[in-house]
Image (cartoon, rainbow, N blue to C red):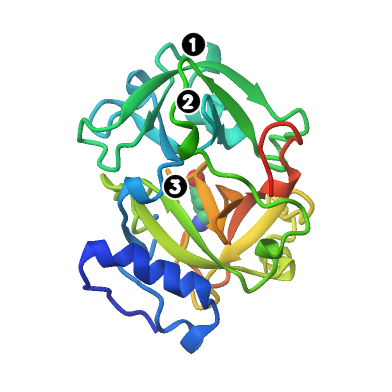
Amino acid sequence: MRRSFAGPLTGALALMAMAVAAPGAAGGTTTPDGVVIGGQPVEISQSPWVVALSSRDRFGGTRAGQFCGGVLVAPAKVLTAAHCVSSDVLGVPLGQVRDLAVIAGRGTLKGTGGQEVAVSGVQLNPAYDAKSNAGDFALLTLSSPLSAGHAIKAAGAGHTAYKAGTGAVVYGWGDTKGDGTYADELRAALVKVLPDSACERAYPGYNKATYRADTMLCAGDESGGHDACQGDSGGPLVADGRLIGLVSWGSGCGQAANPGVYARLSAAPETWVARN
Ligand code: 4AZ
């Protein structure tokens, strides 16, 4: 049931918003699909809370050093995945990365729009477990604040946005095909919150990563094709205008049997994000 979406890019977000408003409509056939996986370019001005994490020293300058996503949750605070600041990802201990920065307001990495702001502090979720990836949250402090109006609130625990079947949008500059083809422009894909059982089935724990519903959220596309992928980690999953997840892990990308696993926002440290 994959369809290519050939409409004007400016209409993409509106179409996505419609699809989110009616998640079950037409069995998903109205879902925009293009090649994030199964997404399409979006305007950063429509989602100004999406930021790129950058280190040109570690990742080179061609894509402005982008290596993960993040979310502006307060003027000088960016939430990202704890694993994004691990030495596994950075190649060296965090303390040795001198140019860690956040790029805000720039959809096209090769462009010069928006702002690059240095990261002046990094806090790891005390409950983060690098082995299982449980509680995959880190909070970055920016050296200077961004616009307060650009921050997004999280859905509080018990909010309906966390319910299976909810339409949600994942944003990122990551791999668009699962083969190392990285996006230059910010993309978004429409996915669905899936029942925990879908990820418990896919990730029962024989591997190093086990799905744990208390700190993780399962989302994707029952027929495959819409997903986050490498390079999207730390970026936002948004439903009902609220942050519900951060891209965390998964097996492959866009496979129906292996949904995306997100850090569940309701499990983020209480004081880190405003909720409603
Ligand atoms: C990653 O490596 C990654 N399909 C992120 C998300 C997913 C897979 C891998 C989910 O950053």
Residue 273: give x, y in percent of width and height: 66, 37
User: Which residue is found at the position 50% from the left and 84% from the top?
Assistant: 25
Q: Residues within 10 Å of mark 1 (few under 14, many from 20)?
A: few
Residue 190: give x, y in percent of width and height: 45, 66
Which mark is drawn over residue 90?
A: 2
Pointer 3 residue Cβ closer than 8 Å to ligand 1: yes
Mark 1 residue type = Gln
Label 1 to label 2, Cα distance in Å? 9 Å
Question: Is residue 223 found left or right of 210 in the rendered image?
Answer: left
Label 1 to label 3, Cα distance in Å? 23 Å
Q: Residues within 10 Å of mark 3 (few under 14, many from 20)?
A: many
Mark 3 residue type = Gln
Question: Is residue 198 found left or right of 176 in the rendered image?
Answer: right
Q: Reading the chain from its start, which is encountered first: label 1 or label 3?
A: 1
Q: Quadrant where the N terminus lies?
A: bottom left
Q: Which residue is mark 3?
A: 230
Which quadrant of the figure has residue 16?
Answer: bottom left
> In this rendering, is residue 273 above or below 76?
below
Helix, strand or loop at disc 3?
A: loop
Residue 49: give x, y in percent of width and height: 46, 41
Is there CB contact under 8 Å for labels 1 and 2?
Answer: yes
Q: Which residue is mark 1?
A: 96
